[in-house]
Image (cartoon, rainbow, N blue to C red):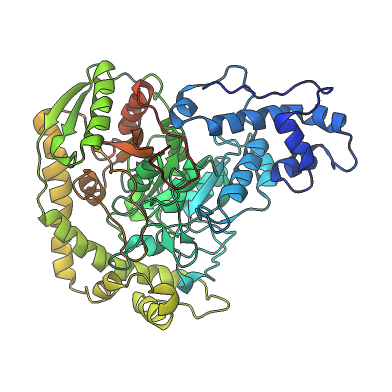
Amino acid sequence: MICRPHVGPASSKFKGLNHLLWKTRKSSPIAIALARRFGSGNKTSMTTLYSAARPLTLALAASLCALAAPPAERALAQDPEAPAFDAEADIAMRVAQIERYDNGPDGLNAVIVHSQTAGFKAREAAGTGPLNGRSVLVKDNIETEEWATTAGSLALQYNFTRRDAPMIANLRKAGGVVLGKANLSEWANIRGDNSTSGWSAIGGLTRNPHATDRNTCGSSSGSGAAVAAGMAWGAIGTETNGSITCPASINGVVGFKPSVGIVSRTHVIPISSTQDTAGPMTQTVYDAALLLSAIAGEDEADAATVGVPRVADYTEGLSAFSLEGVRIGVMVNQLGNREDLKAVFAQARADLEAAGAALVDIEHDTNREMYRDSFTVLKFELREEMGKYLRSIPEMQGAPTPRSLADLIAFNKANSDRELRWFGQETFIEAEAETDREAYEKARENAVRLAGEETLDAIMAEHKVAFLIAPTRGPAWVSDLVNGDSFNGSIGFGSPAAIAGYPHLTVPMGAIEGLPVGLSFFGAKWADHEVLKVGAAYEKARTAKLPAPSFEPWSAER
């Protein structure tokens, strides 16, 4: 696809985009950005406004063209005639996407709230750091000073802490603009059984931009859907087990779960101190590496981040990395039971081999004790860590302030018509009763060892491979609030990396009936930079056609 929008001289008849900007000059966020920079449309002639705004219009047109292109072309095709990145124009386009596609009865519900002064913030941030005013949506379990941090629950709808999580402070220092808060699976999908990913009492049900009747996975549902829909340059998600990589895969974007400790968890509503981490969700691996570089950093308040090996710039060396001779293990027992997914994966294998990678088939069945003991860890840590977080927040104005997991359970019971209509809080209740510290410590040691030393480390050492690959997940299922999610558990290998705290990258690898599917890359603990490099190399080698969002329900006819 080659997109060359008409942007003519000042004497042109203002066709296409130019005509649209002029007609909507009083209401369009794009036109408002023009007016703020170049003067009021009521006092400026068409020719004067057009002439002054032509560089911004060029940048905006290029952004709109890029958004219309399939992800593969957005990642690989750079028009040499395109102007330099214009943060203000790009923000205007992102806000326009939010206002067009996110609201209303059929909207995506990916964004809970967005900034009304984003253009001004972009202008201020431009040139101040590597992000240069780029827009980032933040999952609504991460604190930002502007808005409440709710985890999607009505219990925290007035949780205005007026503080930035350290990762958000790092983001701003790097020139990033916090565009707004992204919807999520309520309480990061840990509350109870039979939940529907992407639903929260605060934000409603997030819809997949590739098929609006389909699920977004979770719990970073809004982050994945918003990036796929072009509502932000990037987003920050969080993961305990699959909550970045699954929504990235199903929404057709890049998602990276870094090694636990690369990014601070302070002022993030928690589940597990063992497994929780934040990470980037973007359109390309390079952008994911750039966003990771911005948010990573040591935090004395989070012991897991102290003294860990980080890279100052995770984009360094991505473009030059070669797959020639790189040994990659293929987890053949985790391909699942879908022949259509296996066909897409076979093409990804062929692309890697064509680029010079040496693929090694590996048969492995994970020890089930890992899952059992990990769940014990999550429940014990949820009760402890949630209590610590709730006791740290300021007193809420307008509602009682919960201070413990027990308080949340009581709130949900008291507000069951709004909170518990479609699924319960079984896991919350079990976690409240998970108080045996000795059993917890034994379970934690066993789960982490089985996932890391005896699974990932052992497999890579035995087969002499540097990385492992598998499909991330199958295609998106139909959202069903009554019956809950419909995961295909035969697909994917993400749990060992989540439980052991190792890096996991998913990159779009193709589609099934127009529904995106991703390819997962795993590496050793702290091998985050190397995993990003191999993912970027695959991205360049990929031959599969990637779908663009339809913003419509799925249809067999399209």
Tell me what residue is drawn at x 34 percent, y 61 percent.
Answer: 189
**Residue 327 found in image quarter:** top left
Q: Position of residue 258 (x, y in %)?
A: 34, 43
Tell me what residue is drawn at x 27 percent, y 69 percent.
Answer: 427
**Residue 37 found in image quarter:** top right
Confirm whether residue 269 shows in the render: no
Work out whether 341 lies above or below 8: below
Work out whether 427 lies above or below 264: below
Quadrant position of the C terminus in the picture: top left
Work out whether 196 lies above or below 210: below
Tell me what residue is drawn at x 38 percent, y 64 percent.
Answer: 187
Q: Position of residue 85 (x, y in %)?
A: 62, 29
Q: Position of residue 104 (x, y in %)?
A: 58, 57
**Residue 414 found in image quarter:** bottom left
Q: Is residue 394 left or right of residue 450?
A: right
Confirm whether residue 361 shows in the render: yes
Q: Is residue 90 left or right of residue 156?
A: right
Q: Nearer the viewer, residue 509 or 117?
A: 509
Q: Nearer the viewer, residue 374 or 195?
A: 195
Q: Position of residue 338 (x, y in %)?
A: 21, 40
Number of numbered tags placed on the structure image: 0
Q: Is residue 211 left or right of residue 475?
A: right
